[in-house]
Image (tube, rainbow, N blue to C red):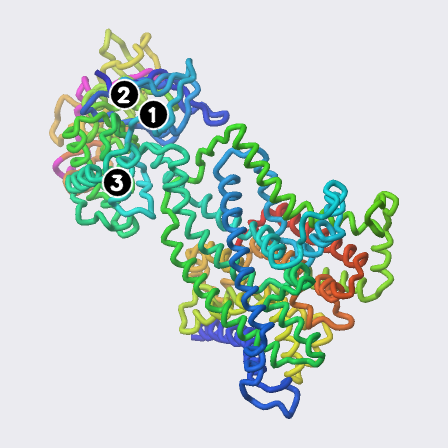
Amino acid sequence: MSDLIVRNVHKRLGALAVLKGASFSGSKGQIVALLGASGSGKTTLLRCIAGLETPEKGKIEIGGTKVLDADSSLILPPERRDIGLVFQSYALWPHRTVKENVAFGLQLRGVPSSEANARVVAMLEKLGLAHLADRYPFQLSGGQQQRVAICRALVYNPKVLLLDEPLSNLDAKLREEARFWIRKLILDLEICAVMVTHDQGEALAMADKILLLKDGHIIQEGSPKAMYSAPETFYAAEFLGTNNIITGHAAWVDGDAVRICGNGWELDGVSRGDTLKGDADAVKAVIRVEALAVSERPTIGLKMSLEASMYLGDRWEHRLRMGDLVVRAYGPDELSSPEVWCTFPQERLWVFPAESP
Amino acid sequence: MARATEAIIFRGTVVAALAAAVLAPVGLIIYQSFLSGPFFDPTATVGWDAFGFIFTDPDFYSAFGVTVIFAIGVVAIAVPLGAALAFLLTRTDLIGRKILEPLALVPMFLSAIVLGFGYTVSLGPSGLVSLGAERIFGFVPWNIYGLGGLILFGGLTHVPHVYLYASAAMRNIASDMEEAARTTGAGIWQVAWHVTWPLTFPALIFASMLNVLLAFESFGLPLILGDPAGTVVLTTYIYKLTALLGVPSYQLMAAVAVVLLALTFPLVFIQRRLLAQSRRYVTVGGKGARATRIHLGPTMQCVALAGVALWLLLAVVFPIGGIVVRAFVSAWGRGINIFEHLTLDNFRQLLIVPALARSLTNTVILAVVGGAIAVGAYLLVALAGHRWRGRFSSAIDYLVLLPKALPGLVVGLSFFWVFLFVPALQPLRPTLISLLIAYTIVGLSYGFRMIQANLLQVSPDLEEAARTAGATTGQTWRSVVVPIIRPGLIGAWTMMIIVFLREYATGVYLMTNGTEVLGSMIVSMIAGGSVDMIAALSFISIVFTLGGFVLALRLGVRVNE
């Protein structure tokens, strides 16, 4: 059963349409990531679910309860939606201790103080904060504040946990740890979580389902693996991963198979998204940098000239050129010969019409 | 090393000048309080005579007690009303809040002496409103004179001071803080109680302290509303000492001033502490305050609007309205139709009496030219303290705070003495320069903070870029810092114009034939009772101040400290 259902939500801020019909659902023990560039509407969508923004159109259900139905002008205020929200700034109340911050939600729900106290302590212990219970927020480090904010949002067992860029204020090392333990915590508690992020690495590592937003639309949704290995649009293909963009013409089209060509080169790929209409169409193609294999000995691949090799620590990055075709590729070793052979696996060269978004 | 010396010389000179300007008058008061006669009297001896006199004078104890009760009363009225007003205007969808926001500040910008006179002509025994009430009830059902009236109107006219700090605190609360409470399950009123109120609390404590201080230093309202009923506070006690004893009893005035200083000085420092502490409450929120306003139902709207309207009526409409009407009629009273007595005579008289005409031009010159000079002086002081971590950098802070503890009346008195005491300064005493120096000290704390706030907003990077490009500290200030804060300086100038226009107490002792100023003229005429002329002067004072106020709003000056 879906714990969260969002249907066709539209939201304007002034003259600007921020959301133009977003729909998705999330279930228990599932993390949904709202991924997109800034201005894509991901935070607005989260705030609509929380009830902090009021959409003009759409329906939202949380835990089987309708919290928003624009048609019958049903709008539940945030406090009646049974949600927990972790703010990007954490928004800990500076006049309350850690314990008081966490206990507030239980007080509001009329939980007897002895029970509330036990639940607060248990929650703080779970996140390793028990020894900080009587501190004030300004006495905590950034990582500790973040854990307090998560405790505060979870302690009353909300139906849905919402996280607004939860990792953006942590430093790089803490962030990688936090990806792991936040995901584990949500799976352990079997709660439905929605997370806003602009960091694809975060979305891929933490989410069970990614929604990619652009200009207020959800342009693709799926598992991280499906999003990464089978993008349906040029935007989705290009947004995730590190990519080579290749522009050229379709030499021939046969079902999914396409041969594209440019100034002195030809490559075989597969057509994705909108099918290509015919020959000689202008096309653009995406291939992940890590999909290319480069060799100094002749292979079946394309012969290209090596412009530079850069050392990245764990690998080398090679810059290759063949006429107007310029690509980057990774390899384990430094290359020195001026001419190399580069293999483009056909299944991973995704071809789109040039005018596709 | 030449570069370092340039800055050191500048800073040293400024600190020395500031210390002389601030400490000389205070020192002279303390010195005078330990003499048995005026300092120019060669027979005066050093001793406790003056304190002995006032500490055995029952009137002094009564004035002391009245001052304390007055201060408590002002806080008790102004703080709850100011907090409520701030909540209504910043946190709810009250109708007309855009218009009410500037209106709520008006009483703060008017001279207290003008406000007091306004109450006399509107609500006094033969005031315009009182006459209306008499027609209905057959008698006037209130008496504005005495401690009760003083506390009531003192409290009502000090609401803006609280509103200013409380509303700033409420606006500064990051909307995240309140949204976090909403999503945790709190309703709007629960958010107000558990989050908004506790985060505003430090600002209210601060505003309470400020009001106690203002009440201790208050002079205009006690003079007009207290004096006729024999209610005397410490400032009016000082003022009346001369009249009481018939001889210039400088040592007694000084002794009372020292007692007053002993009360206000600790307050100023506690205030400073509080402000520093409240910093930790400044919420480290993310986004700007796009907080959802609390929706007031029709009943709540009516109740709130009625409350605000009643306050505006008492604190703004009655005093200003009374003066406006009184300035344009020759008389009113029982059975007189005021429309038959409309006249411009009151203003014509101002032109006939040279002292009154002079007081108008002097006031404008002092405010506009003097305001600019004062801002220049504050800029020098602020620059001297800017990014200075030297041994004396905190000296500037303390020197700037000190005048806050001095009522304008005492500042004027002490500078009057300084100009008598120092032979080299005597030629300046009968000129506007003496007034300008005293005014500059009165406005020092306020003006300095305004400019300092502007300086702190200049990114250190910009200055360091100039230094690394080869500029000296002085060149950096001239070519980078000052040009960047120019809009802030213009704002500060407008605010100083308003502050100097409404000042009335500082000139009471300092002004002399040829250097009359508007507010102090009113003070000197209050006892004489020439209501026609006072009404005309008060009207002009209101027009001046409102002009400055509108100019400040036009320039987008943020009218808070």
Q: In the image, residue B23 lies at what x, y percent? A: 54, 76
Q: Is residue A340 magenta?
A: yes
Magenta region? A332-357
The image quadrant where one finds the N terminus of chain B is bottom left
Residue A99 horizontal side relative to residue B203, left or right? left
What residue sits 62% from the left and 46% below the top? B553
Q: Report, in whole angstroms, how far the alpha carbon at label 1 lies from the one at label 2.
A: 9 Å
Residue A187 is situated, as x and y percent measured from the top left of the image, at 16, 28
* Closer to the camera in the image, B290 or B99: B99
| Sequence-first disc among 1 and 2 | 2
* Amino acid bearing label 3: Val
Q: Chain of mark 3?
A: A
- Tell me the distance, in whole angstroms, between the alpha carbons under discs 3 and 2: 24 Å
Amino acid type at mark 2: Leu
Whether pointer 1 and pointer 2 mark residues with C-beta atoms closer than 8 Å, the reply is: yes
Indicate which disc residue A4 carries: 2
Query: What percent of the width, then of the height, locates residue A148?
Result: 24, 42
Q: Residues within 10 Å of mark 3 (few under 14, many from 20)?
A: many
Residue bearing mark 1: A49
Q: Secondary structure at mark 2?
A: strand
Which residue is painted at 35% across and 19% down in the image? Answer: A22
